[in-house]
Amino acid sequence: NAYGMVLAYVTLGEYDVHHIRDCYRGNCAPRVLEVEVEDIIIHPLYRKANAFSDDYCLLRLIHDVEFNDYIQPVCLPSVIDNNEKTLYNMNMTVAGWGVTENLPQTRHPHILQEVDVVVRPTEFCDAEIEMHFDWESQICTGASEPNTSPCPGDSGGPLMYYNTTGDSG
């Protein structure tokens, strides 16, 4: 790729990169899984010139993954679900390992970060962020609490909501 790097494996079930096993009050999660990547399927409309559009991919792993309380599948929404009217004002969560501090030096967290966001109308992103959002490939969100937001490095990471209907979408 352009950076001279190849994605060789993914780490699943990680929460705190400073510990081999993540434990809280005597309860420990299973060890993380490192699984080799067999193939990277980039979205066909992804363009490096506009890196905010369709900036995600699918990874085909070399073998199946056994799910547990800390490693779960994610349901992808259908095209019908991804429209401004059905998503407007919906509470969602962004998670990632993006930069948390820039000055005096760049600092990445050792614990997986999350922040709650709310789906906003396209005009919000057009005006506040000064970037045109296209509902065909993007979802406009804004912080649900003051002074919180996704961080540089979180782009392409998960934007999630809890589906209470039980539909797999």
Image (tube, rainbow, N blue to C red):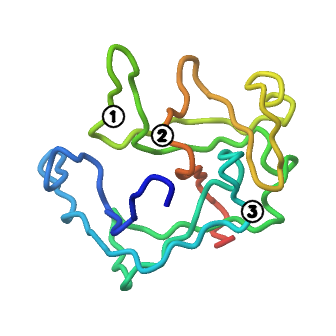
The residue sitting at 78% across, 32% down in the picture is 131
Position of residue 91 measured from the top left corner of the image (x, y, whole percent): 65, 41
Q: Which residue is mark 2?
A: 153
Q: Secondary structure at mark 2?
A: loop
Among the two numbered marks 3 and 1 on one chain, the one whose residue lies closer to the N terminus: 3
Q: Position of residue 41 (x, y in %)?
A: 58, 73
Identify the disc placed on residue 108: 1
Circle 3 is placed at which residue position? 45
Where is residue 25? Give x, y as percent.
15, 45
Q: Nearer the viewer, residue 46 or 167?
A: 46
Identify the amino acid type marked 3.
Answer: Leu
Give the mark nearest the N terminus, 2 or 1. Answer: 1
Q: Amino acid at mark 1?
A: His
Whole-number angstrom distance, CA of label 3 to CA of label 2: 21 Å
Q: Residue at x 45, y 39 (%)?
A: 114
Name the N-terminal-most of marks 3 and 2.
Answer: 3
Q: Residue at x 61, y 67 (%)?
A: 42
Who is closer to the viewer here, 144 or 27?
Answer: 144
Q: Nearer the viewer, mark 3 or mark 2?
A: 3
Report the Cα–Cα distance between label 3 and label 1.
29 Å
Point out the image quarter for the C terminus.
bottom right
